[in-house]
Amino acid sequence: MTLAHLPERWPGRIIAAIALAFATAYVSSVIFLPKPGGRMLIGDALHHYVQLRSLVFDRDLQFQNEYMRMYGIERPDPETRWIFIDLTETGHVRNVMPVGPALLWAPAFLLTTLAVWIANLFGAAYPLDGYGRLFQVTAGLTGTAAAGLGVWLSYRGCNALFAARWSAWASLTLWLSSSAVYYSVISPTYSHAASLLATSAFWLVFVKTRSQPTLARYVTLGALIGAAALMRWQDAVLSFVVMVDLLWRLRQGIPWGRAIGWGVSSAAMAAIVFTPQFLVWQTLYGRVLAIPQGSGFMQWSQPALIAVLFSTWRGLLTWTPIVAVALAGFVPLFKRDALVASAALVFFVISWYVNAAVADWWAGEAFGSRRFISCFPVFALGLAALLDRWSPSLRPLAATSAAFVSYTFLLLLQYQAFMKGLRDIAPYPQGWYELWLARFRVPVDLALWWLRT
């Protein structure tokens, strides 16, 4: 047995080992490259975290004290005045992030709280306030674990249709050569790791139970839709997958009444699981449905359909070409299982439209088109289908996978070097040369810079 056989022999162990390595790298960065003021969470992650900290320690959703403490300010300045002036109709600070990631982080956060409380009984004197780095690191470690578990669930979904070899190589290659890798190790505190887990769980159940159309199946799928929507609201488009499935059943002769009953039950369960977000919105905005970013956030009539895929400004296919290969796999996927392929294609197309319709379709500062990480499990299905059809021997398969992974890691190095301030050495990956070719030069320039310093 060679190293190339390991993914198919022990896919769970390989995925767990990678996730553990990512967790180690994340904790190491926290220790050796600390951010000013002890704050570990920035960007979107901070807005998720204040929800968790406020719910556990203050038992409310008033975030002013959390923001002031996390930003390290004693009084508002021009950059942080929004904490005091951007208030909702109910007098709360606006929070534009979903509550799902905070709920996902809660078990580790609560265990840490208990551990600190017990340690303090024996004289540890660690601040039991939810702000310390021990509390904050739980978000990153949970995110890394969620990403690894999501990849494993995607593998299981692929393995329900294809051999372990193709399923394992597809899942691992996609993980390590797409935007998912960045949000598994560099920024696991963003919602994308949680989204990867939730959508992968949905697709695993969908694929494995596709031959068992029962009420229990649709209720379960509805619950998983609600959970996915809690992590990222856009993932509610999974409901269209259930619609495709029900239309498929109608073609097979299922009575209309039964199909409608299954659909209503699925939607009702999704709404029940989504209830925490309804409650947060009711508290913050005075209504159970809201677009916290404002009505202009979604530009439904002007979607950037081409740019979101092909632009060098974080286009899906230009930044992560492995996805183009995975999409090509939808053709053999149709030949293997038309229902799964139809549902996967509908999910991708609607996700494509939704992501293109967001006002900032480039998703702010990001490593690639991060909002498409929700589509990871269907991309994995497509890639596994292509490998199954191609049936390469292990040596060219391993070489091709290594090429895609290396190509992405070179970009990851370039991107991180730029973000860490080495902008004379590593250009921002915008423009054809900077995105596709500069990554090969950056390691050499970094080595020369290190030798000089």
Image (cartoon, helix red, strand yellow):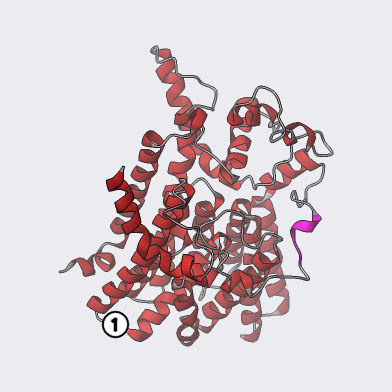
- Extreme left residue here? 1
Classify the position of the C terminus by image quarter. top left
Counting from the top left corner in percent of width and height, residue 33 is at 40, 37
Q: Main secondary structure of the magenta part?
A: helix
Q: Is residue 360 above or below residue 101?
A: below
Q: Nearer the viewer, residue 453 or 90?
A: 453
Counting from the top left corner in percent of width and height, residue 215 is at 61, 66
The quarter holding residue 295 reads bottom right
6 falls in the magenta region: no
Residue type, mark 1 in image: Pro
- Extreme right residue here? 89
Magenta highlight range? 295-299
The quarter holding residue 375 reads bottom right
Neighbour class for label 1 at 10 Å: few (<14), some, many (≥20)? few
Q: Is residue 324 above or below residue 180?
A: below
Q: Is residue 256 above or below residue 274?
A: below
For mark 1, what is the residue?
392
Q: Nearer the viewer, residue 446 or 370?
A: 446
Q: Nearer the viewer, residue 199 or 415?
A: 415
